[in-house]
Structure formats: structure tokens, C-alpha cells
Amino acid sequence: MPVKFSEVTNNLKVLQTIYIEVLGDLRELDKLLLEFNRIYRDFIPCRDWLECRLALAEGFTNAVRHAHKNIPPEITIEIEVLLRRNYLEIRIWDYGSAFNLQEFIVKTARKHNSWLSSGRGIPLLNKIADRLDYQRTKQNRNCLLIIKRFSDHRSKNTTTEQKNICMDI
Amino acid sequence: MNSVVQIIEPEGILDGTKTDDFQHQLDRSINSGVQAILVDFSNVTFMDSSGLGALVKALKSLKAAEVDLFLCSINDQIKMLFELTSMDEYFTILDNRAEFNQQLQK
């Protein structure tokens, strides 16, 4: 069945945008996840939402651990989240030096090892995201873009119980 | 089976800020000569790849010390993390403590 133009534009419409600014400190994860819950809507499939929360956490902790390794924690990490009908876009800006994410993904995929006790963050992000990109910006920052498309199986009526599971309440 | 069992109950978010504490707890248990360790996740709301990394590290050292490791009461988020990384194949994940007690009686 051909997709109607109105449907396409409807799916692209930004329903909500939120900005979150946190310190470059791993302990900020709690606050970040809580703030992120503000963008949750009942129509987002629970599994996708849980994956988005995990992707956000992995993107943030990577920025703190690697990009901001030699940067004081007072220097903040900025996050923008855009919700569209069909997908969620997460952007995470850090002040670290330039880094070739694609090259890193290819390299780590080659030396796959189940028994790793670290270094799972980026492979995990790559698995969750439908699009993953890390670009140098004009302001000498980096921006990690994570796009997660929602699956088609959405429950029409999310119960309060399901909603609480989604948000870890 | 007459085992000396240690139960560990982490709380809140199990991430990079908690992994050292978690590791120390496990090391203490190994040194005290336990035969089985149960990590009860009832009070863990969220786990990231660093938390998982700590568990993998624990599993390795426990295997070497011939201590059995069991996990129980993991929420949907933690379950998803195990599935995405295919690490559910390596861990014994039980529904709850009752199932753990059943395992011990075997």
C-alpha cells in the first residue's frame, strides 16, 4: 500500500524536544535518566524505550570516561532529545578531541570477545541504534547522534504497570 | 548439597560508579570460602555495560575459584542488556530466591 504524503510528514513532525545539561561526572547518570523520562509517551514500545535509555546511558558514560577524561567535571555535557512519531533522536555534545567512531567500531568487531569486562558500550550502542554517528562540530566539540526507530508492534493502551516498568519506577 | 552461600544485594543503578564496591564484595566472599554466590537484583533499577562488565569479571574469577554464581530477580531492562550482549548464555539467571533455594536442594 502506498504511504500517504500526510502520513510521512506526520511521522517526521517533532512532537517534543528536551535539553539536558549534566556535569562530566558518572554520578550524574541517575539525574540524566530521570530527566530523560520527561519525553516518554505511551505509544513508545516498552522495549524500544528501554533500549533508548540504555543507549543514552552508554553515550553519556562514554563521553565522561573517554572524551572528558582529561577535562574537569564542571565542564558540562549537553544532551538534546527529539521525539518524532516513529523514532527518537539523541544528541550528546562533548568537549573531547576528535575521534573516528566508525573506524573504532570496525576494529572492535574484528576482535570480538565475550569475556570482556569493559569496552562493551560502543558495540552495544551500535546494536541498539538504527543510525549512529560521531561528528566534529564547528565549536570544537563532538556530537554523538543516536537514532532509534520504534518497532511497529505498539500496544494501544499501555497500562500503568507497564509504564512503571519502562521508567524503572 | 550443603553449601556455604553468600547473597549479595546491590541497589539502585549498577554502573561504573558501583563496580569497585561490587568487586570488593565478591572478593571478600571468595576469600571467606563460600561455595555459591547469589546476586539478587530486586533492588537494582538500571544496569549499564560497566555493571555487566563487573559481572563478567566476577564470573571469571568465581569460575577459577570454583564458586557457583547465580543471578535472580532481574528486571526487564537488565534482561534486555543480557540479551543484547548474548551474555545470558553464560550466566545462570533464576526467577527469584525461591528458585535459588530449589537449586541448592538439588
Image (tube, coloured by chain):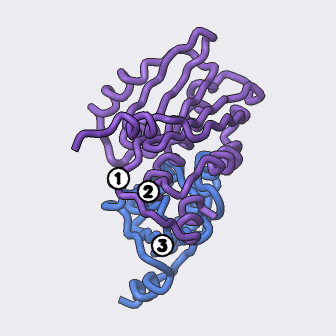
Chain colours: A purple, B blue
- Can marks 3 and 1 be said to lie on one chain? no
In-image side of B83 versus B19 (left or right): left
Is A76 above or below relative to A166?
Answer: above
From where the camera sits, is residue A48 visible? yes
Q: Residue furthest left?
A: A1
Chain of the residue that carries numbered disc 1 in the rendered image = A
Crowding at mark 1 (Cα within 10 Å: few <14, some 14-19, many 20+):
few
Q: How many marks?
A: 3
Q: Closest to the observer: B75 or B86?
A: B75
- The residue singled out by tag 2 in the image is A47
Label 3: how many Cα within 10 Å (few below 14, some 14–19, many 20+): some
Residue A14's x, y, as percent?
54, 36
Q: Residue furthest bottom?
A: B105
Q: Residues within 10 Å of mark 2 (few under 14, many from 20)?
A: some
Q: Residue furthest top?
A: A138
The quadrant holding residue A124 is: top left
List the single residue furthest toward the right: A74
**Residue ID for mark 1:** A152
Secondary structure under tag 2 reads helix
Q: Residue type at mark 3: give it.
A: Cys
Q: Where, quadrant-wise, is the C terminus of chain B in this rendering?
A: bottom left
Q: Which mark is residue B72?
A: 3
Mark in the foreground, 2 or 1? 1
Quarter that holds the N terminus of chain B: bottom left
Q: Residue at x 56, y 74 (%)?
A: B7
